[in-house]
Structures are given as C-alpha cells and as structure tokens.
Image: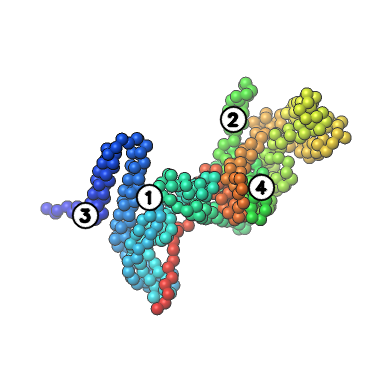
Amino acid sequence: MERSTVPKPPPFLAAMVAQMAATAAALSAWATAAPRTLAEVEQQALVAAQGLGNALLAGVCEVLAATPVGSPHPCACGHPVTAMHQRRAQVTTLLGPVSITRAYYSCPHCHQGHAPLDRQLGYRAGSTSAGLDELLALLGATADSFEAASTLLGRLTLVHVCPNLARAATENLGQVLQATEQQAVAAAWGPGTLPTAVATPPRLCLSMDGVLVHTEEGWREYKLGSVYTTATRPSTTHLGQEDVYAQNISYIGDVTDAATFGQRLWCEAARRGVLTAQEVVVIADGAHWIWDLAAEHFVGATQIVDWYHATHYVWQAAHAVYGEGTPLAKRWAKRRLAELWAGQVPKVLAALRHRQQRGPAVADAITYYTNHQHRMAYADYRARGLPIGSGTMESGCKQIITARLKQAGMIWSLAGARAVAAVRTWLKSNRWHEAIALRPPSLRTYQRRAA
C-alpha cells in the first residue's frame, strides 16, 4: 500500500509558534506585574499583534521567495537573463517594514536587473505596499492635511511615515484618475467610443457650479458637476406632500475651461445612462457658462433655475426698496415669493418694474427673471415630481473642495489641487474600489553599470 506524503510545514512555522507563545507569556507577565486598565492591556495587545503580524508576513514572503518561479523571462531587449544572486529588498507595509530576500537576475547585454518575485507580489523595493499605499491615499484625501493623515495612520496601524508619503500616494492616485477621465473624453470625441452605461435611469439629473481654490498661480475656479437620480419620500414639513431627494450621486470636476469641463461632464452623464434616460433635468444657478453647456450637451433637457438662487433676487430687491429687515420688505417679498412658487414670473416682473428706479438691486432682479423665466415654472416642476433645488451641488462643492482644499492658510500647487480633488470626486461618488483597481503595478527597474 502506498504511503501518503504529508507536506512538510514551512520552516518558519515552528518559529511563529514559538514567537506567539513567547509573546503571550510576556504579555501575561506584564499584565499581572501591576494593576492594569483595559486601555493599557488593549494597547499592549495591539503592539504585540502587530509584531506577530509582521513576522507572519515576513515568513510567508520567505516561503514565496524560496518557491521556484521557473526560468526568468527574456529581457525586454530580447536577450536571455542570467541568475546573479540573492538580493534583499525592503517594503513598508500595513504591519511595518518587511525585508524580502529574493532571486535577482541581470541581463549581460543591456545591464537591466530583474526580480520576478517583485512583479508577482506587485511591489517596488524601497517603497510601500499596495495596502499601505491605498490607506495613505484615503487618509490623504480625507484628513484635514497630509500631516494629519500621517498622524492618523500612526494611530490606526502603529506604522509611522512622513507626511510626504501621504501626499505622494494621494496625488499619484489622483493623476491616474485624471488620466482615466481624459482617456474617456478622448475616446468619445475621437473614434466615437462611448462610455459604457452602468444603468438606464428613468430620470437623470445634472447640476454644475464653480468654487475658487487658492493655488500658487492665484485663485482658480474648480468646476464641479454632479449626476444623480431622484426618489420621493413623505414630506416632514408639508402634510400629505412628498419631498424629492437625490440619490446615487456621482461627481466630475477639474480646474479647466468650460468647453473641456462640458465634455467631461457629458462623459460622466453617458456613463450614468443619459443617452437612454427617459427624462433629463439640469438644475443650476444663473451662470451663463452652465446654461451654454446644458444647451450644447443635453439637448431637450428640462432646465431649472435653483429655487434658492431665484429667491435671493426677490429679497435683494425688497431690501433695496423698503429697507433691510423692515415689515414692509418682508410682506412685499413674501407676496413675490408666492407668485414665484406658483410659476407666475410675469407678475414678479411687473411688481419689480414698478420699482425699477429704486436702485441696481431691482435692475439686477429684473434682468435675472427676464433671462430665466422659462426656467422658473416651479408649479409645473413640482407637479411632475422634479427637484427644484441644487442643494446636491452645493453640498458637493463643500464636501469635495471646501472641506479639504480650503482649510485655513492652504495654498496648493495647481497639479496637487487637481489630483486631490480627483481622488475626492471618485471617493464621494462611491467609486473607491474602481479607483484603486486603476492603479498601475508599482514596479522598479534596476540599471547596473557595465563592467
């Protein structure tokens, strides 16, 4: 009868068992040597767990390094490579620095070096692991600063790195995402390869706005667009009515001209299904560049001026005519707002024209309502279940730009601001896993001097 062969355990297995036992004994002795709080024991256990995890990771890498990988592939120059020797590489991981001794090959023709295990594991010697790099990019995009990201990483993982590593991880990912967005635009406006739609929504809404960012080149406008669907729920303020709210929100943006931004927003809308949506709605304030883009890229869409922007002009005119905060101003404004709410813009304009000599605020209101009255049929919009506010866009500007790029005293490089904002747009669009999957492998090439 044939005897079954049992795989020999890895050499580091016994060492790990011994280290685990020694760690447990040391932790127990420390805990009983003096009265300890749970917080103290928890912290010591965390430090011990990290040490064990680091040893386990290093041991598994040693097993992989000792596993034959077959003959190395030919060099990129076409010549065969030869085994040279074992070389040690270090990579900083979520469990701390790990050293890996692996086979290293060199090409005698072009003198390029090759480490097959590096490619298999997807790391670059002297750098950070993919897991740590992802966490650094996430913290770099969400913490108040790169210094705060570095500090938070240390608190979470006990791994301490300099803030520049958080900056590099965040900006490198942002550059990858920017390139991906630019490729989609180039494909759509070049050979005509349209973005693949992820859904076919019955209604798709879009909003656009701009927010200023302080850069080394001065204050620059970051144009931001949002694409979303809507749903309804019982109103908490108006009994028997329903409120319309945004859901499945995605964002796109950049510091660029309006024409380029329009192309990028269209690509995002196409990805979200604008070409097959039964209804398309554009909601925004009165900026001319926004409505020019809406007319160019979303022909036939219902255009709606944001309700809160529209009411602003009523109040400005009321204050100019009757005085700010006066009872007369409040009564006059409320009557105009009721007319505006009912979509009766001609009545609002008539009331304003009777007072058009009362200052520039009234003249501005007349111009605003004259130019946009076809976008202010609010009663009709509500009857159709359409949103009339661009709060989604206002929130997006605050979440993506203001909360991270407009902290006190911040002055960004233009490239850095664009990259960090790109990471935040994908993160706030719930596309983080897609973003991380787009990163190219972190590999290093070695150039050895000829003898």
Distance between the alpha carbons at the discs numbered 4 and 1? 40 Å
Provide the residue designation for mark 4.
Answer: 212
Give x and y (percent) for residue 126. 42, 60
Going 57% across and 53% down the picture, which residue do you hit? 419
Going 74% across and 45% down the picture, which residue do you hit? 288
Comparing 152 with 429, the one in front is 152
**Mark 1, other Cα within 10 Å: few <14 / some 14–19 / many ≥20:** many
Comparing 332 with 27, the one in front is 27
Q: Secondary structure at mark 1?
A: loop
Provide the residue designation for mark 2.
Answer: 232
Q: Is residue 233 visible?
A: yes
Distance between the alpha carbons at the discs numbered 2 and 4? 33 Å
Decide if residue 411 is on the left or right side of residue 54: right
Which badge, 2 or 1, comes first in the chain's sequence? 1
The residue most toward the front is 34
Q: Secondary structure at mark 3?
A: loop
Q: Secondary structure at mark 4?
A: strand
For discs 2 and 3, the disc positioned in front in the rendered view: 3
Q: Which residue type carries mark 2?
A: Thr
**Mark 2, other Cα within 10 Å: few <14 / some 14–19 / many ≥20:** some
Distance between the alpha carbons at the discs numbered 2 and 3? 62 Å
For discs 3 and 4, the disc positioned in front in the rendered view: 4
Which badge, 3 or 4, comes first in the chain's sequence? 3
Q: Which mark is residue 8?
A: 3
Q: Which residue type carries mark 4?
A: Leu
